[in-house]
Image (tube, rainbow, N blue to C red):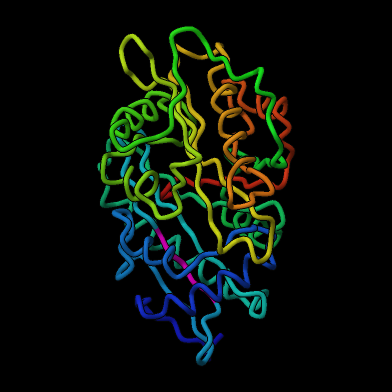
Amino acid sequence: MMKLRWAVPRPEENQQWAALLAAMAAADGRGEVHAVEDLADEWRSVWSHPATDAIFVWDGPDLVGFAWLKAIPGDGDAHEVACWGGVGPTHRRRGVGTALMNWSWRRGNEIAATFDAASPTNLIIEVGQDQADLGALVRRAGFDPQRRFLEVARPTAPVNAARSTGPLGLECVGWSPALDHRARLAHAEAFAHHWGRRPRNADQWVQWYTGHRSFRPDLSVLAVETATAAVVALVLTAAYPQDWDRGPVEAWITTVGTVPDRRREGVAGWLLDDVHRRLADSSTGFERSILGVDDENSTGAGALYGRLGYELVRSVTTWAHPAGD
């Protein structure tokens, strides 16, 4: 431990950071590859302040561990400090992870002290199903499991055209810039009462959803009321080619949402059928679609995905600890 160097990260080190994350993902079965461009997004996030809220751990020229905290103020709800980090496979079980956890705990509590004290602050860590060492570490630190999220996938296959007719008064249309504002409002309404979700302002929506380079507008659809022109449901899709070298060519369905007044009408399944048709027809050659769902989702989403042929690939659990305790 004494030979390791702890330092504030710099943008020019993103290549080493990406290499570390790739090694961690391969060891932990997370299935996600971070390109240098993805890490540049982290630097631009309104929630990231790496000069004070991140640390890199070096062993000579090699980056072997990191912690990156995001300060997420609540909007009438609890604030969050999202703690992201880890240790490369070659340096595990040497105390580096414990030291990073201790650093994250101290800094996370300092961040919490800057938030409006009228709402509580939780420190949040995500743990994949195969990250046994991290799971043990968060337990020892006093974190409690809050929610499990399932990643489920479905092979790309033609969809029966007989199911193309949707609910009365709705039209299925492809995403377009002209409808993006209404899509964001529908997203906020659809997820208003989902665990851990917060509405995205216009800048955040563009950065992480429809303005992101991974967004696939050709594979994203909206349900529009013909009488009002309001967007009442949406399915948004993204693609991450950097993941395909180590896994299947897959499309990530990042968002499936329906406003409460139009639920239980089959709208989401209807839109997903359209997206599945688009995937089957795409020249990209997608082998499957994949999406994430809250294991305790109360809208029936899990059952819907099961009926559509989605099967469990892996799971991630969110752990939380109240700041200051």
**Residue depicted at x 59% and y 59%:** 32
Residue 126 position in % (x across, y down)? 56, 51
Q: Quadrant of the N terminus?
A: bottom right
Type of secondary structure dominating the magenta stretch: strand
Q: Is residue 67 magenta?
A: yes
**Residue depicted at x 62% and y 21%:** 300
Quarter of the image holding residue 181? top left
Nearest to the observer: residue 56 or residue 24: 24
**Residue depicted at x 38% and y 48%:** 208
Residue 92 position in % (x across, y down)? 66, 75
**Residue depicted at x 49% and y 84%:** 58
Q: Residues in magenta?
A: 65-69
Residue 283 position in % (x across, y down)? 58, 50
Quarter of the image holding residue 173? top left
Nearest to the observer: residue 160 or residue 73: 160
Q: Is residue 269 magenta?
A: no
Nearest to the observer: residue 323 or residue 135: 135
Residue 314 position in % (x across, y down)? 70, 47
The answer to whether residue 53 is above or below residue 228 is: below
The answer to whether residue 25 is above or below residue 81 is: below
Please state if 274 lies on the left or on the right of 80 as rendered.
Answer: right
